[in-house]
């Protein structure tokens, strides 16, 4: 992949740098002078298979993530469906799970119907579904007027806790807790009572009860477990940041060699 494949100023993203070292709050519009007329080319870079699956030590493999961020800052509603298509196209979720909620939070409420439709689809695996759920949480956080709608969608998905994977239920719960969804407490308690939530994701009902602001942590054993869980998550995060990567899509599984096409994640 060469810089010449894209026109100026979009091509500058291919040499801008490693996203592990460049914060997502970088002002791409100000730095590169992006305007709505650049949206089509930014979308093309965002979903570029050669870049997304590239086996390269070069900086160009970070171009798609810079494009995601730029599209978010441009509030590019035209990018909603192309960006959602990436959820399935990429097997690993390390970057989609951390970046997409921020991107969709900036794009805003226009993305809610598409994300809700994706969440209702039984085909994606639990990790890809969790990315869509987190994007709804991102929108609900950044756009308070849409918070109730996002909570409703997430809660309705959790209501199917007996059909859902327990780990996915745990991910849904994380998003509801971050949205302070006190109104979802009855559904959450029922899911715990049915033993349909993976406690390793966020803890047990007592811990969630506390995080929703419904009462103190109890009993003391839960405090110990919560602290141990927090330390474990920090350790895992630090280990993940320390691992070198040939490309952003190779952080969990090995990236195929050039000329090979990786199977679509499910």
Image (tube, rainbow, N blue to C red):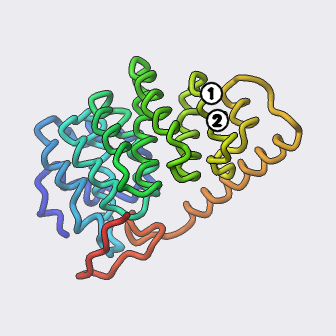
Res 218 → quadrant: top right
Q: Looking at the image, is 84 positioned above or below residue 74?
A: below
Q: Residue at x 34, y 32 (%)?
A: 106
Q: Badge 2: how crowded within 10 Å, few (<14), some, or many (20+)?
A: some
Q: Is residue 49 left or right of residue 247?
A: left
Quarter of the image where the C terminus is located: bottom left
Quarter of the image where the N terminus is located: bottom left
Query: Can residue 30 be spotted in the picture?
Result: no
Q: Residue at x 41, y 35 (%)?
A: 136
Q: Which residue is mark 1?
A: 186
Q: Residue at x 50, y 48 (%)?
A: 163
Q: Is residue 241 left or right of residue 231?
A: left
Q: Residue at x 32, y 70 (%)?
A: 58
Q: Residue 245 placed where, x, y %?
A: 45, 69
Q: Residue 214 placed where, x, y %?
A: 71, 23
Q: Looking at the image, is 240 positioned above or below residue 166?
A: below
Q: Is residue 225 left or right of residue 154?
A: right
Which is nearer the eye, 70 or 169?
A: 169
Farthest residue to the right: give it.
220
Disc 2 is placed on an element classified as helix
Q: Residue 55 placed where, x, y %?
A: 32, 75
Q: Which residue is mark 2?
A: 190
Q: CA distance from mark 1 to mark 2?
A: 6 Å
Which is nearer the eye, 60 or 89?
A: 89
Q: Are marks 1 and 2 in contact (CB under 8 Å)?
A: yes
Farthest residue to the top: give it.
145
Q: Residue 257 placed where, x, y %?
A: 32, 82
Q: Badge 1: how crowded within 10 Å, few (<14), some, or many (20+)?
A: few
Res 88 → quadrant: bottom left
Res 217 → quadrant: top right
Which is nearer the eye, 10 or 140?
A: 140
Q: Looking at the image, is 145 positioned above or below residue 228?
A: above
């Amino acid at each position: 992949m060469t810089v010449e494949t894209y026109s100026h100023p979009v091509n500058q993203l291919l040499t801008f740098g490693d996203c592990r070292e460049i914060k997502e709050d970088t002002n791409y519009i100000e730095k590169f002078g992006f305007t709505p007329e650049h949206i089509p080319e930014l979308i093309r870079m965002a979903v570029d298979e050669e870049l997304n699956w590239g086996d390269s030590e070069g900086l160009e493999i970070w171009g798609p993530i810079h494009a995601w961020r730029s599209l978010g800052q441009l509030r590019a509603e035209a990018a909603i469906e192309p960006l959602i298509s990436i959820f399935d196209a990429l097997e690993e979720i390390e970057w989609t799970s951390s970046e997409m909620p921020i991107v969709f939070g900036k794009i805003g409420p226009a993305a809610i119907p598409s994300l809700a439709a994706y969440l209702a689809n039984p085909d994606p695996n639990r990790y890809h579904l969790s990315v869509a759920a987190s994007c709804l949480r991102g929108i609900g956080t950044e756009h308070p007027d849409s918070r109730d709608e996002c909570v409703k969608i997430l809660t309705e998905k959790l209501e199917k806790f007996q059909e859902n994977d327990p780990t996915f239920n745990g991910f849904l719960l994380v998003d509801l807790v971050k949205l302070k969804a006190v109104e979802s407490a009855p559904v959450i308690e029922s899911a715990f009572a049915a033993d349909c939530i993976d406690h390793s994701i966020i803890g047990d009902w007592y811990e969630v009860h506390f995080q929703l602001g419904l009462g103190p942590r109890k009993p003391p054993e839960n405090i110990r477990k919560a602290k141990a869980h927090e330390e474990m998550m920090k350790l895992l995060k630090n280990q993940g940041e320390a691992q070198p990567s040939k490309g952003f899509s190779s952080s969990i599984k090995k990236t195929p060699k050039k000329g090979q096409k990786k199977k679509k994640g499910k």
